[in-house]
Image (tube, helix red, strand yellow):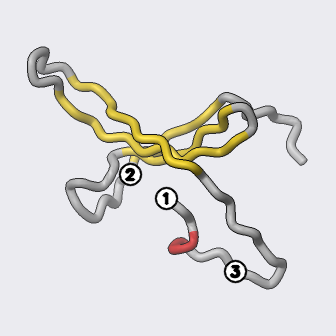
């Protein structure tokens, strides 16, 4: 077990291999009070200001149970 406490912390990673233009520009996870959530972010530009901003969506994260013999494939990762 790690000594690092990631409670109320998260991370977003830039998606270099987007498959379509509607896919998120960033994906990651966030821990809020011990519960895990998926994050997705899109870089957008304000209509009036013309300034870039990051729009973020949060989804519930339900970790899958792992067995010792199970192999985790990229398609099994929830984001």
Residue at position x 64%, y 31% in the image: 9
Where is residue 71 shown, x and y percent of the image? 69, 80
Residue at position x 16%, y 23% in the image: 46
Q: Is residue 15 left or right of residue 34?
A: left
**Mark before the other along the chain sequence, 3 or 2:** 2
Q: Secondary structure at mark 2?
A: loop
Residue at position x 84%, y 78% in the image: 68
Residue at position x 9%, y 17% in the image: 48
**Mark before the other along the chain sequence, 1 or 2:** 2
Q: Looking at this rendering, what residue extends furthest in the top direction?
A: 49
Marks 3/2: CA–CA distance: 24 Å
Q: Secondary structure at mark 1?
A: loop
Which label was assigned to residue 53?
Answer: none
Which label was assigned to residue 15?
Answer: 2
Quarter where residue 57 is shown: top left
The residue lying toward the viewer, choosing from 14 and 66, is 66
Marks 1/2: CA–CA distance: 11 Å
Give the residue number, with chain letter if any, for mark 1.
79
**Mark before the other along the chain sequence, 3 or 1:** 3
Where is residue 32 shown, x and y percent of the image? 66, 33
Give the residue number, with chain letter if any, for mark 3.
71
Quarter where residue 33 is shown: top right
């Amino acid at each position: 077990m790690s000594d690092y406490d990631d409670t109320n912390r998260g991370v977003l990673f830039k998606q270099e291999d987007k498959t379509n233009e509607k896919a998120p520009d960033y994906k990651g996870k966030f821990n809020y009070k011990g519960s895990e959530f998926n994050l997705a972010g899109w870089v957008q530009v304000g209509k009036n200001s013309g300034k870039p901003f990051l729009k973020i969506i949060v989804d519930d994260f339900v970790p899958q149970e792992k067995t010792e013999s199970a192999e985790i494939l990229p398609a099994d990762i929830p984001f």
